Each structure stands twice: as C-alpha cells, then as structure tokens.
Image: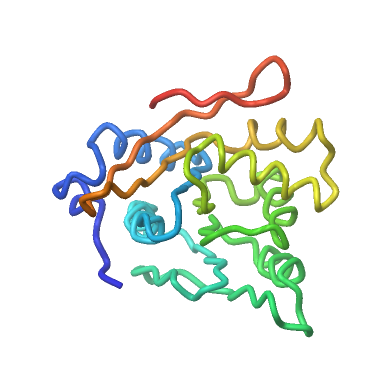
C-alpha cells in the first residue's frame, strides 16, 4: 500500500483543506475521530495520513484484524484481532491491549466483537484523541452500526446512542467517485436532546 501524507491527499483533491483543518483541530484537542467509507474507498490510506499528524512522542496502539495499519512512527505497537482464534477472542485481545494504557488508539475496521471494549475504554478517557475506522457509506450509517454493535455487548437502547454522541467528535467519510477519484467530507458529531446524535458539515 502506498503511504500518502495528508498533504498528498489535499494536493490530489481527495481531502479538502477545510476537512483537513477540522481533523487537525479535532486531534489536537484530543477529540475522537471516526473514519468511514465503503470497502475500497480509501479508509486505510486516510487513517495512515491522519495518524502521521499525531505527536511523535505519543505511544500509539493499533488494533487491526487485517494487518493493514503500518504506522510510520517510532512509538507504536500493533495487536492483531484474530476473529477466528479459539485461544483469544477479539474482546480478550482488545482488553489485553488496553491494559497497556497507550496514549491513543488507532483502530482499523472496527467490528462487533471488540466494539464494547473499545467504547468502554474511550468512556474512561484513557484513549482520548483516538482514530477509529468503520465500514459504512456515511457518518450516520457508521454511528448506527456502532450503536447496534454496542447493544450486542451490554449497552442499552438508551446508552448506546448517547455514548456515541459523547465519544465521537468528528466523522470523516471517504467516497469513491465513478471515475475512480476520491472525495472526503467531514461532519461534526454532537448530542441531541433526545439522547441521540446529529451530524453537520464541519
């Protein structure tokens, strides 16, 4: 996989400068950033570019089931989530990883088995300023999927959407156009009075 920087993505037109500014501000303020898009849209490329923006002296922990995350920085560790490993479930692997108390998490393609562990760690603010990727066609769809997965791991119908609204500060959606080009849009995520969330352009 070609490792592109945020500047490369801006130059190619895949990442508008305004969206990049929103990402930089979110990560600088230790907000949690959700990267979403359908398969093949370019989520992992964007995740690598955004991870490059994090302070080099912070230790990152990458959780990934496909071994796609390869961060170019001195202080990082990867734990692979083996969803077919009978010796250690994804929940157990995530829990073991979080015991190391990294400065931030970089989670590639979050899925149901480990969602609860990750959200609980973020609730404790142990890993504020994390990057999480979820396969979905829009920020709303990604949040709905996360909410549904949280229900499978002990969250309630009320707590799941409220938790996500509190945890996710910015959602960035990568879309692949018919001509093969990529387009990225950023949306601010905020809680609503009905204990849900709303997304508005950043």
Q: Residue 114's spot in the image, x, y percent? A: 70, 61
Q: Residue at the location (62% across, 26% down)?
A: 197
Please tell me whether residue 125 is drawn above or below residue 79 in the rendered image.
above
Please tell me whether residue 76 is drawn above or below residue 86 in the rendered image.
above
Q: Is residue 52 left or right of residue 10?
A: right
Q: Is residue 73 left or right of residue 113?
A: left
Q: Residue at the location (57% across, 66% down)?
A: 63
**How many numbered discs, if any?**
0
Residue at the extreme top of the image, as rendered:
193
Q: Nearer the viewer, residue 105 or 115?
A: 115
Quarter holding residue 144: top right
Please tell me whether residue 170 is drawn above or below residue 148 in the rendered image.
above
**Where does the N terminus fall, quadrant-wise?**
bottom left
Please tell me whether residue 104 is drawn above or below residue 198 in the rendered image.
below
Q: Residue 48's spot in the image, x, y percent? A: 36, 60
Quarter holding residue 107: bottom right
Q: Residue 187's spot in the image, x, y percent? A: 43, 31
Quarter holding residue 128: top right
Q: Is residue 115 left or right of residue 198?
A: right
Q: Residue at the location (82% across, 43% down)?
A: 155
Q: Nearer the viewer, residue 124 or 116?
A: 116
**Where does the C terminus fall, quadrant-wise?**
top left
Residue at the extreme left of the image, as rendered:
11
Q: Is residue 12 left or right of residue 62?
A: left
């Amino acid at each position: 996989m070609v490792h592109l920087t945020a500047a490369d993505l801006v130059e190619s037109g895949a990442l508008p400068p305004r969206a990049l500014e929103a990402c930089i501000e979110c990560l600088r303020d230790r907000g949690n950033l959700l990267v979403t898009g359908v398969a093949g849209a370019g989520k992992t490329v964007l995740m690598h570019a955004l991870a490059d923006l994090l302070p080099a002296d912070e230790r990152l922990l990458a959780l990934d089931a496909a071994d796609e995350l390869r961060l170019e920085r001195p202080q990082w560790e990867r734990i692979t989530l083996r969803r077919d490993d009978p010796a250690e479930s994804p929940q157990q692997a995530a829990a073991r990883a979080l015991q190391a108390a990294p400065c931030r998490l970089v989670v590639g393609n979050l899925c149901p088995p480990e969602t609860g562990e990750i959200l609980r760690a973020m609730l404790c603010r142990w890993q504020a300023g994390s990057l999480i990727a979820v396969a979905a066609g829009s920020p709303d769809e990604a949040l709905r999927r996360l909410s549904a997965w949280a229900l499978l791991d002990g969250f309630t119908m009320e707590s799941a959407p409220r938790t996500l609204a509190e945890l996710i500060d910015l959602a960035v959606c990568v879309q692949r156009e018919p001509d093969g080009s990529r387009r990225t849009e950023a949306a601010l995520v905020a809680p609503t009075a009905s204990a849900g969330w709303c997304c508005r352009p950043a």
